[in-house]
Every structure is written in structure tokens, then in C-alpha cells.
Image: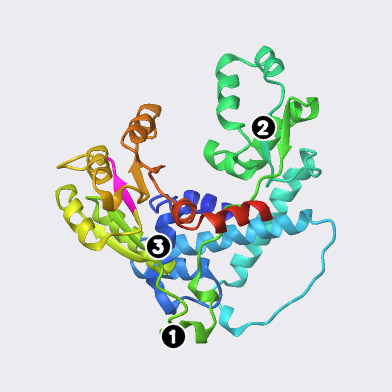
Amino acid sequence: MRRWRRNLAIHCPRLPTHRLGWQADLASAGTSTSTIGWEYTLLNLWVARQRITPEQASSMALSTLIDVLFDVTQAPSISKQIRHDDLAATSIDCAQVEDVIAKTQWRWQGWQNAKLTDYSLHKAPVIKQAAALREQCSPQFYQMLVQRLNGQHSLYDLAVQMQRDVVEVTALLLPFIQLGWVELITIPDLPALIYPGRMSKTALLPAAPSPATPPKALIACVDDSTLVRNTMESLLTSAGYQFLGIESALRAISVLLVRKPDLIFLDLVMPDANGYEVCEQLRKLSSFRHTPIVILTGNDGYSNRLRASFAKASGFLSKPLNAETVLGEIRKHLEPNATNLSITAR
């Protein structure tokens, strides 16, 4: 997922970098998703909708190959297994394959020359001795390091952010790593998308209603943005939830009273009323006294969180949203036992 995000930033900068948009597009593909994988499905979908060019899709595929082959060169032991699959036939020609191999070899040679073979590009640098760094660096360079080296971004990610070659970025940090001022830590990949293509063919057939499995919760989203409502609908329905979209804050209370959703996502800034006012009005009604209400906003400041608490909101999510955060918030409020079991399992 991290590789996918950074290659999108390089080759398809106009596409959204948050995963809520990718999940919505993947859900819209429905049962037509490719058996090759969700990445191939999304690239085909975006080309078909003219959101990217075929050349951009090809660049994404070739960059992914380079990254994967470079990881293979670093593997301590390799077991070769070739699987022939007619479904994976592509238009990549010999010249492109040679180019991929040449670029992989060039990166590996640079990695060796910089004496970096003992380090992994998937690890994230974090400052361990801030005082020593501050004494040895200029104020501007130190502030850059503090901002970037927070243990959240891999060396690969940093290279994309800084628009520099990953070998150059790692070599720049190497003296600090060797001195122990900066440490490379292992970070997890981003959670995977929910991919309909992974389901079996029988799972895609309509199932007979069963009284033992009641329908999932009804989730409402009050937001004047059509894009946000449509995206939330695609995500939530693909996850099995029922969805209710409301575009007007003035209509929200009357519609919510009729439908009585199990959880409400409420936009903070709307033309006719703000989310705090709507939340306060809902809390005065016995029907919504205990209903989870999650505020959505693009301004994640302390004052906004404090006011949301005063309005008796149950949660607070910052935009742009991503699929895992939205689904995690729903599970936290509606399936607390499942969330606790997940934490315990970890």
C-alpha cells in the first residue's frame, strides 16, 4: 500500500492520495474487478474513465516492477518459482523489460556504492538524540529533520516527499544513523483495501435472506458535498452497511427522526447550519441521546475538538478521510466487543 501511494504521487499526481477515494472507485467496479489484483483493476478503471492516461498506467506498473525487483536483490535468500498465468498477459515489450532491469541494477549499484546494503528502504527514520543533532546542524536543516523524521514515513516515502532519489536521501542520513542520533525503525504497511475480487464466485451471487443474520447498521452522513456523500455510500455499502445520505443541515433532523440511524457522520461546515448546532439539537431529543455522532472537518484544531466535546459529539474525524479510519470509527462505536478482541489479539 505504501508503494502504491508513493508511485501514485509520482506518476498520477492529480489522483487522490487518500484511500477513501480508492476504496470508493474499487467498490464502483463491482464484480468486474480483475482476478489479477485490485491495483490492475484501479488502473484499468481510471484509464477507462480518462482520469489517467495509458502512459501513466504503464509508468505505475513499471515503477512497481523496479521497486519489487530491488527488494528481491536485498533478500538474504531467494527461492525462485515461476507461475504461468494467461490472465496476466500484458503489452509490456522486451525494451520495457530491459529498461526495468537496467534501472533496478542502477539503483542497486548506487545503493552498494553508498555502503547502504545493510539498511532497508522500508524502515522509517526517527530522531533519538535531538540535542546532538541541533548542535551539529543549521537551524533550517534541523527543523527539516524534526518535521520529516517522525517515525511515520519510510525512507522511500521521504524520498518522494523531498523529490529526491532514495539513495541520495538515505546517504544524507547515514552519518546520523551511524552516530546513533537517528534510528531506523520497522513500521507496518498501510491496511489493505477491501477488494471484491478476493471473494469467490458463489459469494457474489445473491444470498437467500436468513433470519439469523440481520442487516448491518444504518449509517447516516449529513454533508453538503455530493462527492463526500457518494464516496461514503460506496465505501459503507461495500462493507455491508446500510447508508443514508442527507445534503442539508436544515432537513437533517426531520429525516433522521424518521429513519433513526445507528450512527451519524456530521459535517462541521455547511451553508445553513454548522455541525455543532445540529449535534446539540439532536442530543436534546431522546431518540438521539445515545446515538454515536461523529463530526467531520477539514480543520483538526484543539478548539474544534473542544467544542465538539461540548456539543456532546462521540467522535471527531479529519478530512481527507480514509477507508480504515471511517470503518474503524464505526466498529469502535457499534462493535466495541469486536474492537477489544482485535486489540487483545495484537
As measured in the structure, the alpha-carbon distance from the residue carrying label 3 to the one carrying label 2 is 34 Å
**Between 44 and 327, the one nearer to me in the picture:** 327
Q: Residue shown at 68%/56% (left/top)?
A: 345
Q: Identify the residue position indicated by label 2 in the image.
A: 126
Instruction: Determine whether the residue tagged by mark 3 lies in a helix, strand or loop.
Output: helix
Q: State the mark number for residue 207.
A: 1
Identity, as a three-letter code, of the amino acid under mark 1: Ala
Compared with 68, 29 (above or below) is: below
In the displayed orientation, state which residue is furthest to the front: 286
Circle nearer the viewer, 1 or 2:
1
Q: Quadrant of residue 94?
A: bottom right
- Tag 2: residue type? Val
Q: Which residue is mark 3?
A: 235
Q: Residue furthest top?
A: 135
Q: Earlier in the sequence, mark 3 or mark 1?
A: 1
Compared across the picture, whether 231 is left or right of 278 comes to: right
User: Percent from the top left, x then y, of residue 38?
Assistant: 51, 68
Which range of residues does the magenta coloring cover?
Answer: 264-269
Residue 196 locus on image (x, y percent): 48, 73
User: Does the stretch in magenta take in 266?
Assistant: yes
Magenta residues: mostly which secondary structure? strand
